[in-house]
């Protein structure tokens, strides 16, 4: 149920900070199991892009990292208001140590997470029966399958339960100002909150940070300012190994038959969820060729270049407007292509009108996650989404500038390694060979071979998938959280989100992150029920609003 600031007068079993998909999943799973749960969200009921200086990040748009206003959202549902809705599982190889992937290897196996995918799918409105494909025998590129959410905003998908749950209390427009840490007991005793003009404290037995990778990291780095020995010290793992993915398109795929093409296009399941197959190098091929984990799928993106088809031209114009969000600036070539395609549409007004009506029917009638027009020539763009290799030089750190609450703001250093670029290209070349050998099709590259790596590098940009910043491991020198997502240095503080992933894999991280949140909720329920005294009875203090104090400026930030 939704509550006002008076809710801070009560104690809770668990306080979850952040109401994006991961925070909502953790809070709902806890409340379903009878845990008295508080869900805190800094934004309003309607998720929105943050204004500058609203999030505590001053991340300017640069070559490889998109601006913070583009990659963050405040409000109920978080970034799920704008994400594509793509649900993909991690792979077994993501959890294994690979000698060609630095810092790879998780402290748990994939089998510890797999049982929680189905509950995660249900929370994300992507539940299907038998969605995970069985591995194909003796093939270098077994088909992997992705599904898509029916309702992209996780808050809307679970609105009824968020509103009616008697164990869950949701408070909006509530900013975390500081974490109250007891260094003697090694635990949080409270969290300071700014809410609707007042300052409060909330007390719980356990706390879960689900503020996104950068948000979680910023809170912990600010705590480390006051307690420098935490998280392995200034040279420890906190804020390092920042990863996302490499995504883009450098080739078209031309299928040999319509049947081959249809295997990789959208299909609707009995639950109403769309699924589609993708090309993905198998684990044996990845190890043999030292490839990153990567997936490919057909699309119509950029398919209008040099063509007269009004439908493709309109689709290109539609996608171009959305693409500006990811790649903030257009070059002269991009603008030239856009206006050439626009002129093609204007030259064929009647055909463009009928095509527009058909596109609207497909988008809002058939309601595919994104539009894919069947091509009579069997040529499609080939989209890729691949792993970024962990690097300790990719990091988030504090800058000596404070927000209105006295917390230091965040800055990042984010680049791709040459191995990321060459691995992406080698995966394309391996797929091209396999397609030709199997007579399934072939790749038609956008540019000459000697320019392909440059083409990949020009499209490499992230900041949406905030992976690795509070990575999972076995000791505080190399990791921030343990196998149960608990911060190693703090006995009652947990992290939920993809920032705990030691490697990024090929998958969009939302589904795996929600699966980890479901697993974390199960773990917390067990922990709380094992306590001799219920958490709600152990909290006798009732805190009144008080004025928050500002933090002192440290002599050294980084």
Image: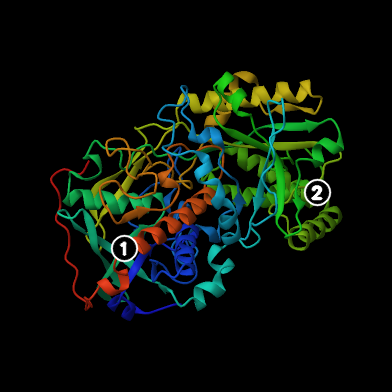
Vertical arrangement, residue 80 with respect to residue 201, above or below: above
Q: Is residue 51 visible?
A: no
Q: How many residues crowd around disc 2 within 10 Å: few (fewer than 14), some, or many (20 or more)?
A: many
* Label whose residue precedes the other's in the sequence (2 or 1): 2
Vertical arrangement, residue 549 with respect to residue 289, above or below: below
Q: Residue at x 59, y 28 (%)?
A: 283
Q: Which residue is mark 1?
A: 531
Which disc, if any, is residue 99? Answer: none
Classify residue 471 as left or right of residue 419.
left
Vertical arrangement, residue 539 with respect to residue 440, above or below: below
Q: Determine the CA span between mark 2 and mark 1.
A: 66 Å
Give the quadrant of residue 56: bottom left
Q: Which residue is mark 2?
A: 310
Q: How many residues crowd around disc 1 within 10 Å: few (fewer than 14), some, or many (20 or more)?
A: few
Q: Residue 387: percent from the left, percent from the top?
A: 52, 34
Q: Residue 245: percent from the left, percent from the top?
A: 51, 38
Query: Foreground: 217 or 299?
Result: 217
Q: Residue 344: percent from the left, percent from the top?
A: 77, 46
Regarding mark 1 in the picture, which secondary structure is present there?
loop
Query: Foreground: 506 or 452?
Result: 506
Regarding mark 2 in the picture, which secondary structure is present there?
helix
Frontmost of labels 2 and 1 is: 1
Query: Foreground: 461 or 17?
Result: 17
Residues at marks 2 and 1 touching, judged by CB atoms closer than 8 Å: no
Q: Residue at x 41, y 69 (%)?
A: 35
Q: Residue 110: percent from the left, percent from the top?
A: 52, 40
Where, quadrant-wise, is the C terminus in this rendering? top left
Give the quadrant of residue 136: top right
């Amino acid at each position: 149920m939704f509550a006002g600031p008076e809710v801070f007068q009560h104690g809770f079993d668990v306080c979850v900070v952040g109401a994006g998909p991961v925070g909502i999943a953790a809070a709902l799973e806890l409340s379903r199991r009878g845990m008295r749960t508080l869900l805190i969200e800094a934004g309003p009921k309607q998720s929105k892009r943050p204004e500058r200086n609203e999030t505590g990040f001053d991340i300017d748009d640069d070559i490889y990292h998109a601006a913070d206003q583009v990659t963050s959202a405040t409000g109920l549902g978080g970034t799920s208001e704008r994400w594509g809705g793509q649900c993909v599982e991690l792979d077994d190889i993501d959890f294994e140590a690979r000698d060609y992937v630095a810092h790879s290897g998780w402290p748990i196996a994939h089998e510890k997470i797999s049982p929680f995918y189905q509950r995660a799918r249900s929370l994300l409105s992507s539940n299907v029966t038998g969605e995970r494909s069985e591995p194909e025998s003796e093939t270098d590129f077994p088909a992997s399958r992705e599904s898509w959410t029916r309702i992209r905003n996780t808050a809307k998908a679970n609105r009824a339960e968020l509103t009616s749950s008697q164990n869950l209390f949701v408070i909006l427009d509530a900013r975390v100002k500081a974490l109250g840490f007891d260094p003697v007991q090694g635990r949080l005793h409270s969290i300071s909150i700014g809410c609707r003009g007042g300052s409060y404290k909330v007390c719980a037995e356990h706390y879960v940070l689900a503020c996104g990778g950068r948000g979680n990291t910023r809170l912990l780095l600010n705590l480390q300012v006051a307690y420098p020995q935490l998280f392995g010290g200034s040279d420890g793992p906190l804020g390092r190994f920042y990863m996302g993915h490499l995504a883009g398109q450098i080739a078209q795929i031309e299928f040999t038959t319509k049947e081959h093409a249809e295997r990789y296009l959208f299909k609707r399941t009995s639950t109403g969820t769309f699924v589609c197959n993708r090309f993905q190098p198998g684990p044996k091929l990845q190890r043999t060729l030292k490839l990153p984990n990567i997936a490919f799928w057909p699309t119509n993106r950029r398919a209008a270049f040099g063509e007269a088809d009004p439908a493709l031209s309109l689709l290109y114009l539609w996608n171009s407007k959305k693409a500006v969000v990811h790649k903030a600036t257009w070059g002269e070539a991009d603008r030239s292509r856009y206006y050439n395609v626009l002129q093609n549409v204007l030259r064929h007004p009647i055909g463009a009108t009928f095509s527009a009506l058909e596109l609207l029917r497909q988008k809002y009638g058939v309601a595919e996650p994104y539009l894919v027009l069947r091509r009579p020539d069997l040529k499609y763009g080939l989209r890729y989404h691949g792993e970024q290799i962990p690097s300790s030089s990719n990091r988030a750190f504090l800058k000596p500038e404070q927000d209105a609450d006295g917390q230091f703001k965040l800055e990042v250093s984010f680049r791709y390694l040459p191995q990321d670029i060459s691995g992406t290209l080698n995966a394309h070349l391996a797929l091209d060979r396999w397609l030709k050998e199997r007579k399934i099709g072939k790749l038609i590259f956008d540019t000459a071979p000697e320019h392909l790596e440059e083409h990949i590098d020009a499209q490499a940009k992230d900041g949406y998938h905030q992976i690795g910043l509070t990575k999972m491991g076995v000791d505080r020198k190399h990791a921030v959280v343990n196998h149960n997502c608990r911060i190693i240095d703090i006995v009652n503080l947990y992290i939920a989100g993809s920032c705990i992933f030691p490697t990024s894999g090929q998958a969009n991280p939302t589904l795996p992150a929600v699966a980890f949140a479901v697993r974390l909720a199960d773990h917390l329920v067990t922990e709380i029920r094992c306590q001799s005294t219920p958490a709600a009875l152990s909290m006798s203090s009732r805190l009144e609003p008080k004025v928050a104090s500002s933090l002192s400026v440290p002599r050294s930030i980084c």
